Amino acid sequence: MNDRSPATQNANRSWPLTIGLLVGAVVTFSVSQMVWQPDGGNRLGLGLFFLSAFVLVAAAIHPWRRPRSFAKLALWSLVGIPIFAVLHNVFYAIGEFAKNVPVLPTVFEFLHVVAFIVALILCPTGVVIGVVGWFVIWWLGRRGAKTAASDNES
């Protein structure tokens, strides 16, 4: 879902920015887990957890410049919410059925937790970033077209 051809993709991606955003996502996630309170209000921890998801998605999409790419992100994230919610339940059920097998419960517990996080954290984040990104890029393009049209009239 990148806007550029493979030849210009590497030249236009800011790798220091990408790496910085990934480090920011890891740090924000780590802090969210440090302030998480298992038996109380988790507003700060949950807010930092969502912020880490936003920064992680931003690390992947920061070079995008077309509204269509953001629209695809929003659409696929919206489709992903029920898919990963169902996968979460399927992995949980398989893990419960496989309790007697030595390794399988651990594997399926990991998979159902990952599917849960993707369904409730990453996919909604992708929807929000996709919709907002689409609108901002569309609006800036429209504003730029109006400016170019007024320059041509002069």
Image: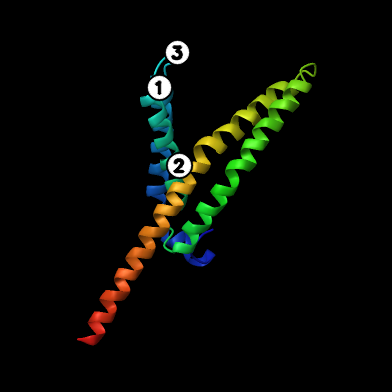
Horizontal relation, residue 51 to residue 118: left or right: left
* Viewport quadrant of the C terminus: bottom left
Closer to us: 62 or 112:
112
* SS at circle 3: loop
Going by the numbered disc 1, the residue's amino acid type is Asn
* SS at circle 2: helix
Q: Distance of mark 3 from mark 1, alpha carbons? A: 9 Å
Q: Residue furthest left?
A: 154
Q: Distance of mark 3 from mark 2, alpha carbons? A: 27 Å
* SS at circle 1: loop
Of the two numbered discs 3 and 2 on the same chain, state the one appearing first in sequence. 3
Label 2 environment density (alpha carbons within 10 Å; few <14, some 14–19, many ≥20): many
Q: Choose top left, top right, bottom left or bottom right for residue 1.
A: bottom right
Going by the numbered disc 3, the residue's amino acid type is Asp
Going by the numbered disc 2, the residue's amino acid type is Leu
Residue 123 place in picture, x, y as percent:
52, 43
- Residue 102, numbered circle: none
Provide the residue designation for mark 3. Answer: 39
Label 3 environment density (alpha carbons within 10 Å; few <14, some 14–19, many ≥20): few
Above or below, 121 relative to 127? above
- Residue 42, numbered circle: 1
Identity of the residue drawn at 38% across and 64% down: 138
- Residue 56, numbered circle: 2
Identity of the residue drawn at 46% across and 52% down: 130
Q: Residue furthest top?
A: 39
